[in-house]
Image (cartoon, rainbow, N blue to C red):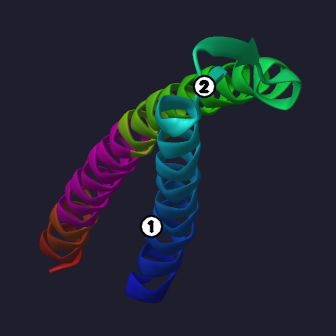
Amino acid sequence: MPKRKTTALLWPAIFILLLLLSLLVLAIYVFTTPLMVTGGTTTTPQPEAAVQQPTATISLLTSVISLVGLVSTMALNWRKEFREREEFELENEKIKLELEKTRLELEKLRAEMKRGRG
């Protein structure tokens, strides 16, 4: 059982680390890429940067939204698993109590039968 829990936590952690790494690379690119290049006294637009900058910004925003979605989904899933585990444990306790009650009733019936015969 502990191995399953470790594996269940390992893959999302790896995915989050890779997503954060890609976010870092995108953020560095978005905030360090100049839109204009100065040449002498005039500034001339750099066509590649003019197209790449919005694309990188949109990609960065998409990655951030994906990260938020991943984290919220994982949190909701963990809450659900916790609730299910609690319900399972309560159900097990209920079954154990019912078994104990039935065992005591059976012992009581056996004792009454022995007294009736004896």
Magenta residues span 82-104
Amino acid type, callout 2: Gly
**Tag 2 residue:** 40
Between 37 and 9, the one lying in front of the other is 37
Q: What is the secondary structure assignment of the residue under circle 2? A: loop
Count neighbours of disc 2 (C-alpha within 10 A) and say few if under 14, some if 14 to 19, many if 20 or more: few
- Provide the secondary structure element on which disc 1 rests: helix
| Residue density around tag 1, few if under 14, some if 14–19, many if 20 or more, within 10 Å | few
**Looking at the image, is mark 1 or mark 2 earlier in the sequence?**
1
Query: Is residue 52 at least partly visible in the picture?
Result: yes
Q: Residue at x 67, y 24 (%)?
A: 62
From the top left corner, tell me how far across and down residue 84 is, in percent.
43, 41
Residue with the mark numbered 1: 9
Q: Which mark is residue 58?
A: none
Q: Is residue 103 above or below residue 42?
A: below
The nearer-to-camera label among 1 and 2 is 2
Q: Nearer the viewer, residue 46 or 55?
A: 46
